[in-house]
Image (tube, rainbow, N blue to C red):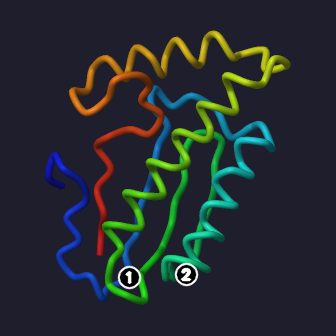
Amino acid sequence: MSEGGYKIRNPAAIHFITFAVVEWVDVFTRKDYRDIVLDSIRFCQAEKGLVLHSWCLMSNHLHLIVSAKNENLSDILRDFKKFTSKQIIEAIINNKQESRRDWMLKIFKEEGTKSSRNTNYQFWRQNNQPLI
């Protein structure tokens, strides 16, 4: 994978993708945050041509077996990660009932300072590798 994003060498193939939360924070134990991921997957299927063959959402990571109708999987994955990370961070910030809010935001902020591509928070790990 290049620094700029995913290297999908065969855009017509089916790929196994894993997205992990930085520091393996158990974000998806809360329904609100799971729903953001699931709604985004549905949007990508309906509007962007994502073909979802299988998936498994765990407490701190997501497994997908996917392809794209328009062979634009790299673009879809980039947009998915960008959108979900912003939405989940915003949901955590606005959730005054979230007992782990300060702790999670501190981790995401610290991880964000480690990447030159970020100015604030880092939600998803950067080192995901697509497999064919």
Judge whether 122 appears above or below 109 on screen.
Answer: below
Q: Residues within 10 Å of mark 2 (few under 14, many from 20)?
A: few
The spot of residue 81 in percent (x, y) is: 45, 51
3D distance between C-alphas at marks 2 and 1:
8 Å
Query: Quadrant of the image for the N terminus?
Result: bottom left
Of residues 109 and 30, the one drawn nearer to the viewer in this rendering: 109
Judge whether 8 appears above or below 51 on screen.
Answer: above
Residue 53's label in the rendered image is 2
Residue on which the image places disc 1: 14
Residue type marked 2: His
Q: Residue at x 40, y 62 (%)?
A: 77
Judge whether 75 appears above or below 66 on screen.
Answer: above
Q: Residue at x 34, y 23 (%)?
A: 119
The spot of residue 20 in percent (x, y) is: 47, 43
Judge whether 79 appears above or below 25 on screen.
Answer: below
Secondary element type, mark 1: loop
Q: Residue at x 41, y 82 (%)?
A: 68
Q: Quadrant of residue 45?
A: bottom right
Q: Residue at x 40, y 14 (%)?
A: 110
Disc 2 + disc 1, Cβ < 8 Å:
yes
Secondary element type, mark 2: strand
Q: Residue farthest to the left?
A: 2
Q: Is residue 34 left or right of residue 44?
A: right
Query: Quadrant of the image for the C terminus?
Result: bottom left
Q: Is residue 60 left or right of residue 115?
A: right
Q: Quadrant of residue 90?
A: top right
